[in-house]
Amino acid sequence: GEKVGFLTLEKIHVFYGGIHALKGVSLSVDKGEIVTLIGANGAGKTTTLRAISAQAAVKEGRIVFDGQEITRCPTHEVVSLGIGHVPEGRKIFSRLTVWENLELGAFGVRNKERIRDRMGEVFDYFPRLKERLNQKAGTLSGGEQQMLAIGRALMGEPSLLLLDEPSMGLAPIVVEQIFEILGELNRRGMTLLLVEQNAFQALQLADRGYVIQNGEILLADAAQALIENEEVKAAYLA
Ligand code: ATP
């Protein structure tokens, strides 16, 4: 039969009141891939990720993850099936410590030893978080906060990570560091769906990309082909 991806969105429609934010978005991500979704402000990138993790209601269409339909699963169930979401603006708990933020990412896991093991793995990727375990998250630098947001999602033991503009507000060198870690996560088996306004950097990291415009997928291609696409160059890489 037809090949079905690890994650598949089939003609998804999302509305915010009268605003038709997603107009039949279809995309797929295979196991082990890095796929990026690029587009301008308000194109529907965040909404696409929110539809996957059930934070935006899907009016029409289907979402299938790892062979199971998740279109109407509640968020906690989507998380427990293995989808981690690193939200736009990071949304860490500023008044809680690094340790407490990470622990919250493991919600549902009661076994303390497993939580500690998992934290150890997070610290392998982000040694700076280990040095700052008892620091209040709100006092971390922007880059460290982004690391914490990713670390918190990893605590849920995802097999697919949704990342909403991890480069937002960060200095180029810090973006470089974050993207390097994303590459490392992927080499160790993590599948990534990456939303970015920083299209060039995202396409350099990704295997494939989708361009979204006004709630519709405009283009889908290999990342390198999109980098070389004149239309994409003019609109998103200028
Ligand atoms: P950005 O990069 O600016 O976050 P985006 O591509 O992620 O843009 P979305 O945030 O998904 O875009 O927004 C898609 C459309 O839906 C926009 O027109 C936006 O104004 C609208 N929208 C998003 N969230 C809401 C909401 N909670 N209520 C009403 N409209 C919304």
Image: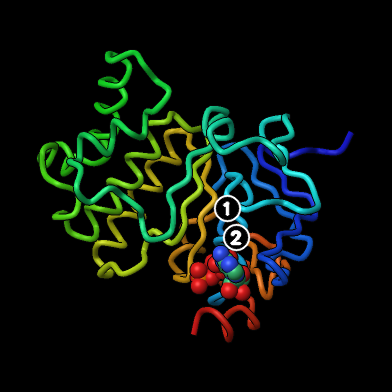
Residue 206 relative to residue 214: left or right = left
Residue nearest the viewer, comparing 219 with 106: 106
- Residue marked by disc 1: 50
Q: Is residue 111 left or right of residue 100?
A: right
Residue at the (17%, 41%) spot, across then down? 97
Q: CA distance from mark 2 to mark 1?
A: 5 Å
Which residue sits at x=22%, y=51%?
Answer: 94
Ligand 1 positioned in quadrant:
bottom right
Residue ranking furthest to the right: 1
- For disc 2, does the CB lie below 8 Å from ligand 1? yes
Sort mark 2 into few (<14), some (14-19) or many (20+) by Cα contacts within 10 Å: many
Instruction: Work out whether 96 lies above or below 15.
Output: above
Label ID, residue 104: none
Nearer the observer, 82 or 134 = 134
Question: Residue under circle 2?
Answer: 47
Can you tell me whether the CB of the residue at mark 1 lies under 8 Å from the nearest atom of ligand 1? yes
- Tags 2 and 1 in contact by the CB under 8 Å rule? yes
* Tag 1: amino acid: Arg
Most foreground residue, 76 or 84:
76
Indicate the secondary structure of the residue bearing disc 2: helix
State whether residue 39 appears in this view. Answer: no
